[in-house]
Amino acid sequence: APPDPDHPPEPGDAPVIPHMPEWPELSAAFHEPVIGVAEALASGRSLILIGAPGTGKSVALAMIAARAASGDPAFDGVERAPFYLHAGDLIFTEHDVSLDPFLSAIAHRASTLTATDLRSYVEFKLRNGNALILLDGLDEIPRGQLEETANWLASLLDEHPGNRVIAAGSLNGFGLFS
């Protein structure tokens, strides 16, 4: 729906579209404020990187992970532990506790030594609001799984407020994550 000039959003409630020189029509289509990538990272808000396949979304997530892991204060002033996972690695079952799909998705990338303490470390970071969840591949999963992923992520963030998500996907279906 187009913005209502009689009822403007409260500060911080409006979606923000980063300036993307290679895709200027994105911000024009949404009539939303445009900011640079550095400003978007410093905002402390959860973000979704939107682009066509091959535009560097996964590379951007890797750069963000490296900067967060090195304690770069340019983000939002919070030292966060980055957790990279691919949406295709999330496996949901009927009786999942919200943390189980997250742990299983990152566990297969962890070394044997790290894997033994992974659950307690992840729980500690999530409980203290110091996790940076980097969710890649939203454009590589079926729409039904995309909706399930969005619902799971909303539940995880409700249970563990203060954490931040930076996700990557295409223009299709990203509205589920707003």
Image (cartoon, grey):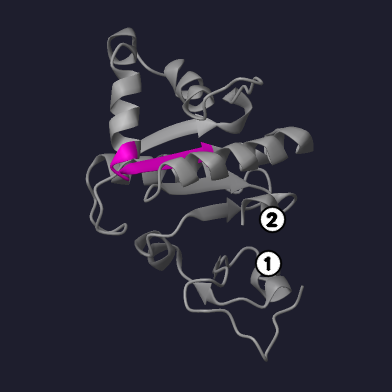
Q: Going 48% across and 48% down the picture, which residue do you hit?
A: 166
Q: Is residue 96 above or below residue 175?
A: above
Observer-side mark, 1 or 2, equals: 2
Residue 131 belongs to the span the image colors magenta: yes
Q: Is residue 165 above or below residue 175?
A: above
Residue 118 belongs to the span the image colors magenta: no
- Measured as percent of width and height from the top left, residue 3 is found at 70, 80
Region of the chain picked out in magenta, as a range: 127-135
Q: Going 63% across and 41% down the picture, which residue do you hit?
A: 151
Image quadrant containing the N terminus: bottom right
State whether residue 173 appears in this view.
Answer: yes
Numbered tag placed on residue 26 in the rendering: 1
Q: Is residue 40 above or below residue 145?
A: below
Q: Secondary structure at mark 1?
A: helix
Q: Is residue 10 above or below residue 136?
A: below
- Measured as percent of width and height from the top left, residue 88 is found at 63, 27
Residue type (three-letter) at the residue carrying disc 1:
Leu
* 80 relative position to 27: left or right: left
Residue toward you, 27 or 150:
150
Classify residue 30 by image quadrant.
bottom right
Q: Earlier in the sequence, mark 1 or mark 2?
A: 1
- Measured as percent of width and height from the top left, residue 112 is found at 33, 8
Residue toward you, 128 or 117:
128
- According to the image, label 2 marks what residue? 175
Numbered tag placed on residue 73 in the rendering: none
Q: Going 66% across and 21% down the picture, which residue do you hit?
A: 94
Classify residue 17 by image quadrant.
bottom right
Residue toward you, 138 or 19:
138
